[in-house]
């Protein structure tokens, strides 16, 4: 809306009079520049495999995954009859049973802002928001697929000696203990014979801050030529590549917020997604162009022993 300068309350140019351009409209100018928008980091592409994505097209498709059977080894005695094993694969079904959509309209009267390609801008934002929404949903589903040996306060399939936190008794993470927490997660995966190459760890930003306050801030301890405090890189710690995310699930423990922190190998989690529809069309109800899209996806913990969970609250230092 244009701004109108009020007329002077009286003639002349004395005190209180407005200047000679009183009553002139000051036009609005639409800037061709936009304020930058920042998005929550998404991590699914780094922590999950997409080996079984296949040719999914629509919500309701199913990808059938066959797992490698375990061959039984028997002791042999001379002249004994051999026991025959018929190996069979367990079947895991990856259902593409979730879908998200967006639907927005560019009214014809908004074409006066034509110096900005609004539909293209909205499509870019929708893609980012889709990733955030899907990351949050998939991360929230991981915990249910992790076996008891890889979480809780008696974690470790061999030792049962690792305290990783449980409902009602979360682990308190401090800068003096954060490295121990990471090493414990790694050892739990070691006891499950999980490969060291490709391991990942997804942590909330405060946990990453604890790492930077820990002994790893000294370049000589981290093994890097530059201190972690100086370059801000978390990098690899105890065979894990660390990723910070604001999308991890949380719970309330008394007056504290507790976080589900996940570690693992891409073998443990699979993800499949497809943007099945994205289109522009004229609206039937008003004068404008619709932009809408549909993305279908599914995820599955296909090997829970390749994942581990730390249930933790932030300490005071």
Image (cartoon, rainbow, N blue to C red):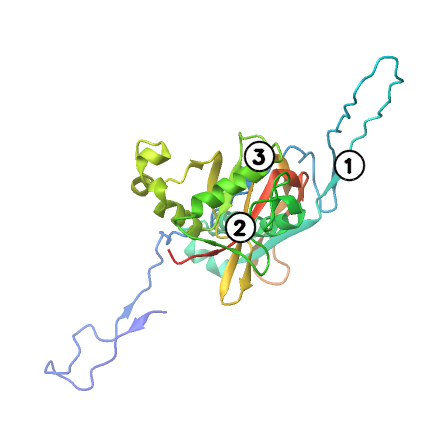
Instruction: Give the left or right position of residue 231, taking residue 290 as reference.
Output: left
Residue 294 visible? The answer is no
Query: Which of 141/165 is in front?
Result: 165
- Name the front one of labels 3 and 2: 3
Alpha carbon separation for disc pair 1 and 2: 30 Å
Residue 22 visible? The answer is yes
Q: Position of residue 40 (x, y in %)?
A: 47, 50
Which residue appears farthest toward the bottom when viewing the image? 10
Element carrying mark 2: helix
Residue 262 lies, with reference to residue 2, above or below; the image says above
Within 10 Å of disc 1 (Cα), the crowding (few <14, some 14-19, many 20+) is few
CB atoms of marks 3 and 2 within 8 Å: no
- Name the front one of labels 1 and 2: 1
Mark sitting on residue 132 = 2
Q: Position of residue 273 (x, y in %)?
A: 63, 42
Alpha carbon separation for disc pair 1 and 3: 26 Å
Query: Which of 7/267 is in front?
Result: 267
Alpha carbon separation for disc pair 3 and 2: 31 Å
Q: Quadrant of the N terminus?
A: bottom left
Residue 309 lies, with reference to residue 226, above or below; the image says below
Element carrying mark 3: helix
- Residue at image position (81%, 17%) is 76
Q: Position of residue 317 (x, y in %)?
A: 37, 55
Element carrying mark 1: strand
Query: Which of 170/2 is in front?
Result: 170
Q: Which residue is mark 1?
A: 91
Which residue appears farthest toward the top when viewing the image? 78
Within 10 Å of disc 3 (Cα), the crowding (few <14, some 14-19, many 20+) is some
Q: Which residue is mark 3?
A: 190
Residue 308 lies, with reference to residue 129, above or below; the image says above
């Amino acid at each position: 809306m244009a701004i109108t300068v009020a007329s002077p309350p009286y003639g002349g140019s004395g005190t209180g009079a407005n200047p000679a351009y009183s009553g002139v409209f000051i036009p609005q100018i639409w800037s061709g520049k936009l304020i930058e928008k920042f998005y929550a980091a998404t991590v699914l592409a780094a922590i999950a495999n997409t080996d079984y994505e296949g040719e999914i097209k629509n919500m309701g498709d199913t990808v059938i995954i066959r797992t490698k059977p375990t061959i039984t080894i028997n002791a042999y005695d001379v002249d004994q009859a051999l026991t025959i094993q018929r190996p069979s694969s367990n079947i895991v079904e990856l259902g593409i049973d979730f879908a998200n959509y967006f639907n927005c309209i560019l009214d014809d009267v908004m074409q006066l802002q034509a110096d900005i390609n609004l539909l293209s801008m909205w499509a870019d934002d929708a893609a980012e928001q889709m990733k955030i929404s899907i990351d949050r949903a998939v991360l929230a589903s991981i915990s249910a697929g992790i076996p008891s040996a890889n979480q809780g306060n008696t974690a470790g399939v061999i030792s049962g000696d690792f305290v990783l936190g449980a409902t009602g008794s979360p682990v308190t993470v401090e800068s003096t203990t954060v490295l121990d927490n990471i090493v414990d997660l790694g050892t739990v995966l070691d006891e499950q014979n999980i490969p060291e190459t490709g391991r990942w760890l997804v942590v909330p930003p405060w946990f990453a801050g604890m790492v930077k306050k820990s002994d790893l801030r000294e370049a000589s301890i981290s093994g890097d030529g530059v201190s972690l405090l100086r370059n801000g890189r978390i990098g690899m710690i105890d065979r894990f590549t660390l990723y910070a995310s604001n999308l991890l699930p949380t719970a309330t423990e008394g007056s504290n917020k507790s976080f589900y922190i996940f570690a693992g190998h891409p073998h443990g989690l699979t993800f499949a997604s497809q943007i099945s529809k994205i289109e522009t069309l004229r609206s039937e109800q008003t004068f404008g162009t619709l932009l809408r899209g549909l993305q279908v996806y599914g995820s599955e913990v296909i090997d829970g022993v390749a994942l581990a969970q730390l249930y933790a609250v932030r300490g005071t230092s």
